[in-house]
Amino acid sequence: MAKDKKPRRPRAETPKGFRDYFGAEVTERAQMLSQIAEVYRAHGFEALETSAVETVEALGKFLPDVDRPNEGVFAWQDEGGDWLALRYDMTAPLARVAAQFRNDLPSPYRRYTMGPVWRNEKPGPGRFRQFYQCDADTVGASSVAADAEICGMLADALEAVGIERGDYIVRVNNRKVLNGVMEVAGVLDPTDPEKFAEERGIVLRAIDKFDKFGEEGVRALMGKGRMDASGDFTKGAGLSDAQADVVMGFMNAKRDTGAETAARLRELVAGSDLGAQGVDELEYIAQILEAQGYGPDRIVIDPSVVRGLGYYTGPVFEAELTFEILDEKGRKRSFGSVAGGGRYDDLVKRFTGQEVPATGVSIGVDRLLAALRAKGRIGGEAAGPVVVTVMDRDRMGDYLAMASELRRAGIRAEVYLGNPKNFGNQLKYADKRQSPVAVIQGADEAERGVVQIKDLVLGAKIAASASVEEWKSQPAQFEVPLAHMVAKVQEILARNGGN
Amino acid sequence: MAKDKKPRRPRAETPKGFRDYFGAEVTERAQMLSQIAEVYRAHGFEALETSAVETVEALGKFLPDVDRPNEGVFAWQDEGGDWLALRYDMTAPLARVAAQFRNDLPSPYRRYTMGPVWRNEKPGPGRFRQFYQCDADTVGASSVAADAEICGMLADALEAVGIERGDYIVRVNNRKVLNGVMEVAGVLDPTDPEKFAEERGIVLRAIDKFDKFGEEGVRALMGKGRMDASGDFTKGAGLSDAQADVVMGFMNAKRDTGAETAARLRELVAGSDLGAQGVDELEYIAQILEAQGYGPDRIVIDPSVVRGLGYYTGPVFEAELTFEILDEKGRKRSFGSVAGGGRYDDLVKRFTGQEVPATGVSIGVDRLLAALRAKGRIGGEAAGPVVVTVMDRDRMGDYLAMASELRRAGIRAEVYLGNPKNFGNQLKYADKRQSPVAVIQGADEAERGVVQIKDLVLGAKIAASASVEEWKSQPAQFEVPLAHMVAKVQEILARNGGN
């Protein structure tokens, strides 16, 4: 560490909350995104890459009645006085594009997009200020067939990246059904949408805590309130037991089949037009998914899905991975949500005044990558390139030619380009590169037209076991004619699973 | 257009100098970058994706003696008071990473990176404030074998994306040779590098204008100065004719073979140690490239390459595409430079105090894409997805199932999800999507178990030619049993080159 009072050098540090991605972290993500893109494209979705920078005005991120942008975005003032900001999601830029290019884009407009977004938030463990999003949206389709299409496509995308059928489930709900339930419970008045807003907020938050507080806790929050273990009291929504029964009925409405669940929901929203419409939509979605072969082993109606409901206006959906992993305390738990979305109908209106229906899904790129790692689909020991060592500085051309020859055979290969004087350093380098094979040719070998091929994987194993007999019976280094170099390297790589 | 005094809606506009990329613009670039990445990886280069945001301090972009960052970057002050900025190239972040992770990274460290960079500059036609860079660098290798490797890899990368051998040339020069020439000409004193800095600056700028001003103009600039057609006078470097002869000799030193060029350069720098070292390096590069089979049809020593010499300390190189295109005035001209780079040895030192040798290349992503388009390698008429039309809203499940079946056969396909009432709108949509085929099934067809397959490409041709005989003899619409839908669509697609 440099002392404080030395002439100051710049700190070589990634800014707080940001990170760099190395090697396989980059290529594995790129591969996963390319597999997802292929599924999206097959469904007629077109790629869109908006600029990373938007006007704060287009993002709608000015604080109310203030000239400064919301603190949640990274923003700065242009020379011209305009406020610019980095996009914080992919939906706001889509709304801008849908408005800006509305005369040129087909309608409905299906698009997918993949890239980083930025959040000016306090970073925390695993929470970064730049991360990837991967979205697919359909703009301009009011039919919930568009929502159904996205649910099916999401299932296809998960399978395409390596999540097997049975390891995931896409759950579908509808905000209209929940609003219908609220109406029946007497906390939503269709003629005065603002009325009971506070109560509904408390109910929504309570539902969202179902996993944590259980039925009793949620009931307390819907009623007078809930005292936690520390004695803190959270004020309740003030619903009567009968009202709370209606909402709890909704939470517990899932039945064995979609048809039974829908029938139960229809009972619960009896008397609410909005609720009935929501159930119709769910039935329609279930019906057309079934027609395409997406059975309840992949996509189910599940009233307990209540994700970000403030934002959505119709169907909402969530993909959950159902296999178990060990959490940080060694307990088994199911992997959980990796994607979600739903219908939102107001975003384009901000720009044009026209209501444009839209629905879409966002895949949590980092979560899905973590899942693929947990399933062993990616992230096995990545073998590095074959390293051609340099024994004789004057014969660099020959070494580079050997590497070329290996590459022509489809093998990753490189020549050691550091100072070749210390051969030990060359092998240490090969080790750091996780090279499976080193190729060695000194003056003597060159004269005889041979090379030494060192199996570094086997060498490491032998070094670990350290029995002299094994050492002798399993040589980790082979001398072959130069003409057999590629074949020998291929043979060793085949044993170790390629590079 | 909204009137000025209406309640104001946000403008739906990409910020000035930024742009959005649609469909094939995104996928063609992604494909090209993935082909380049494959070549880089085969050479042992590892992917790196740094955060888009850096501290201004790490970028070295503070104005001298001022607390505000250089205006060339997009920068803002964090809550903590730190200045953050968007990266303006890929080299500054690499230097930061090489310093920050120096104990973990292998040395030499070969890495490639691809992504957007941002410049806070006045936008102009074709000049954007966000654009892609694609770089490969080797950090920690002082041998110019590293430079040679990158030149060869650059040739491989160009061929991998579809630039044929003969359509490109990689030119290599060495800054040390030019400095040697300056020394011989008496405008560089090795014991006092600052001396004659102004004269050398004028000479460098003059050399750079060789294409524009010709030999006579360059000679004038090296001597007393040059008067242009408008009568404006540019002050010259004040070199004598003998001095100017030396520099002009350098510019014209290219001979038929690399060996002859090197011999001529060696004559020119006679007496300069630095110059002799530069010629040695060029000869070494030529020799080891030759050993790998990169002949002068692909990589040549060319003393006229003088790119960004202020930044570089040794070998410099540039890839030029040699085929001709028509410029905006319809004149033939050669396509020109698409990549360049060289050796720079001081970047990491800013952070650690240690000198770390480095060399690298940057491919101009947009220029190379434009070249591939000019050569017809990409950007042909991109066919859109097959559109399954909706004749009967209640049978949406069936239509979605048809699209699924087409996709399972590897065909991009989608169902029209707009309001299906007006069938003409559905065909207009298919037209906007550049769909090659529409699938139609009304109640009658459904009952008979058939579908109508409309060849939209042929239909458009017939509509254009408009002869009744052709119309009759070449029907553009076919009725087939539903079970033959995929086969018939495949047949039509094959005729039109797939989708």
Image: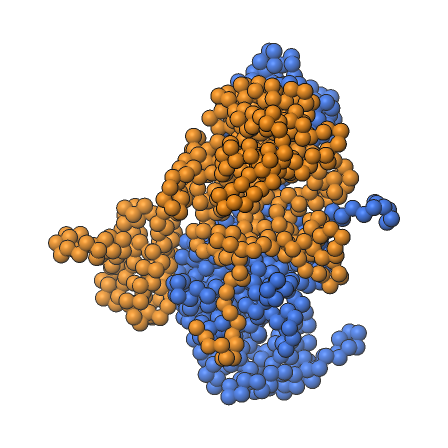
Chain colours: A orange, B blue
Instruction: Residue lying at the far left in this picture: please name it.
Output: A469
Asked if residue B358 lies left or right of residue A83, the reply is left
Residue at 71% from the left image edge and 52% from the top image edge: A63
Tell me which residue sits at (25%, 59%) in the image. A452
Q: How many marks?
A: 0
- Which percent across, then down, holds residue B35? 49, 49
Where is residue A368 shown, x and y percent of the image?
A: 47, 42
Identify the image quadrant of residue A361. top right
Image vertical order of residue A173 relative to residue A372, above or below: above
Write down the quadrant of residue A425 in the picture.
bottom left
B273 or A284, which lies in front? A284
Asked if residue A337 is positioned above or below residue A118 in the image, the reply reads above
Placement of B472 over or under A465, stated as above or below:
above
* Nearest the eye: B216 or A55: A55
The answer, for residue A456, to whether it is visible in the render is yes
Identified at 60% across, 19% down, the residue is A267
The image shows residue B155, relative to residue A379, as above or below, that is below
Where is residue B17? Give x, y as percent. Answer: 70, 56
Q: Indicate the quadrant where residue A415 lies.
A: bottom left
Q: Is residue B382 visible?
A: no
Q: Tell me what residue is drawn at x 66 percent, y 43 percent.
A: A94
- Residue A8 vs residue B70: left or right? left
Q: Position of residue A486 (x, y in %)?
A: 31, 52
- For the N terminus of chain A, the quadrant is bottom left
Give the camera-side residue of A302 and B494. A302
